[in-house]
Amino acid sequence: MEKKRVAVPLVCHGHSRPVVDLFYSPVTPDGFFLISASKDSNPMLRNGETGDWIGTFEGHKGAVWSCCLDTNALRAATGSADFTAKVWDALTGDELHSFEHKHIVRACAFSEDTHLLLTGGIEKILRIYDLNRPDAPPREVDKSPGSVRTVAWLHSDQTILSSCTDMGGVRLWDVRSGKIVQTLETKSSVTSAEVSQDGRYITTADGSTVKFWDANYFGLVKSYNMPCTVESASLEPKYGNKFIAGGEDMWIRVFDFHTGDEIACNKGHHGPVHCVRFSPGGESYASGSEDGTIRIWQTGPLTHDDTETLAANGSTGKTRESP
C-alpha cells in the first residue's frame, strides 16, 4: 500500500483577521521577503524563506486589501479601506507617503523601476503616483469600466493591467496613451492576476478557471477548470511546469502546467484561501486564509523534469487527474 506523504507547512501567526493578499519580493542581497495584507489593518513583513516576523507597518485605520514591495524590497506599499494608499520604508517601518483617495483602495503595485506607484479601487480610477514627486497630483488613466480589484505592471512599465470586482476580463492599458489596448475575456470576475517572473505569462483566476495568457501577444495559452471555486493562482517561476491554486475549499492544490493534472493537494487551513504565491526561486509557496494564518509550503528540490511528485508536494504520491 502506498504510504501517504503529508506536507507540513510553516505556519505564520500574527494577524488577528483574514489574510487577503501576499506578495514576495525578488531575491535581494539580503534574501527575499514576504509581505501580507490583512483585514486587521496591520500589514506585516516576514523573512520569505523562514516566515519569521520582521515587522508590522502601523498606521492604517481600516482593512488593508493589497500589499507589495519594490524591486529591492526597500519600500512597501499598501492599499486600504481607510481610503489611502501608503508607502513605507521597509527597513524602519516608517510611513513615507500617504496618498488620499475618495474611496476604498483595493490594489497597488510598484513599477519595475520603483519610481511609480499604481493604485486602483472602488472609485474606478487607475492612478499613477510619481514617488520622486509625491506631492504632485497623480496621473489618472482612463476610467476603469468597473471597481478595480487587481493591478500590475508589465512590458518594462509600458503597460498596466487591471481586473474588476463586478465584471469579467482583464484590461491592458498603454501607459503612454492611457487607452485600453486589449481585453483578456473571462466569464467571471478575475480575483487574481499575476505576471510571471520572466514576463512571458499572465496567470488569472476567475473562480471556476485558471487561465494562462501570452503576456506579449495576449492570446490564451491554457485554460483549466478548477475542482472548486478558486480565488488565487500562481505559476512556478523557475521552470513554469506547475502552478498552485487556492480558494473556497481551504486546500492548496498543485497542478501540472502542461496537462492540468492535479499533482498534490495540501490541507491545513481552517478557512477559505484568499491568496497563494510562489516564492521567487520556486522552492516554496505561501497561502493566506480567512483563518488569519499564512502557511509556507515547501515545493521540494526542483528539477527541470519533475517526473516524480516530491514528498513535500502534498499528500498524494501519484499524479491524480482533477475531476
Image (cartoon, grey):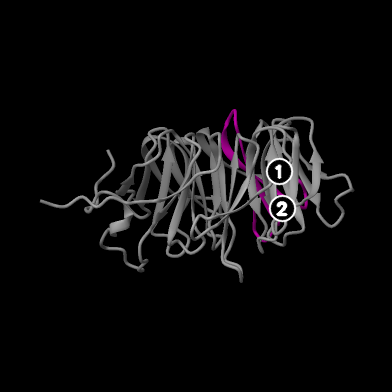
Is residue 151 something that shows in the picture? no
Please name the amino acid that badge 2 sits on.
Answer: Gly
Would you say the magenta stretch is mainly helix, strand or loop?
Answer: strand
297 relative position to 40: left or right: left
Give the Cα separation between the discs numbered 2 and 1.
8 Å
Q: Is residue 274 part of the magenta span, yes or no? A: no
Q: Name above or below for residue 257 compared with residue 281.
A: above
Q: Is residue 178 part of the magenta span, yes or no? A: yes
Give the residue number, with chain letter if any, for mark 2.
93
Q: Which label number is shown at residue 203?
A: none
Q: Earlier in the sequence, mark 2 or mark 1?
A: 1
Q: Which label number is shown at residue 58?
A: 1
Q: Name above or below for residue 168 compared with residue 277.
A: above
Q: Position of residue 58 (x, y in %)?
A: 71, 43
Closest to the observer: 306 or 300?
300
Closest to the observer: 277 or 53?
53
- Label 1: few (<14), some or many (≥20) within 10 Å? some
Q: What range is drawn magenta here?
A: 150-179
Q: Residue at x 43, y 33 (%)?
A: 271
Q: Position of residue 268 (x, y in %)?
A: 37, 41
Closest to the observer: 298 or 175?
298
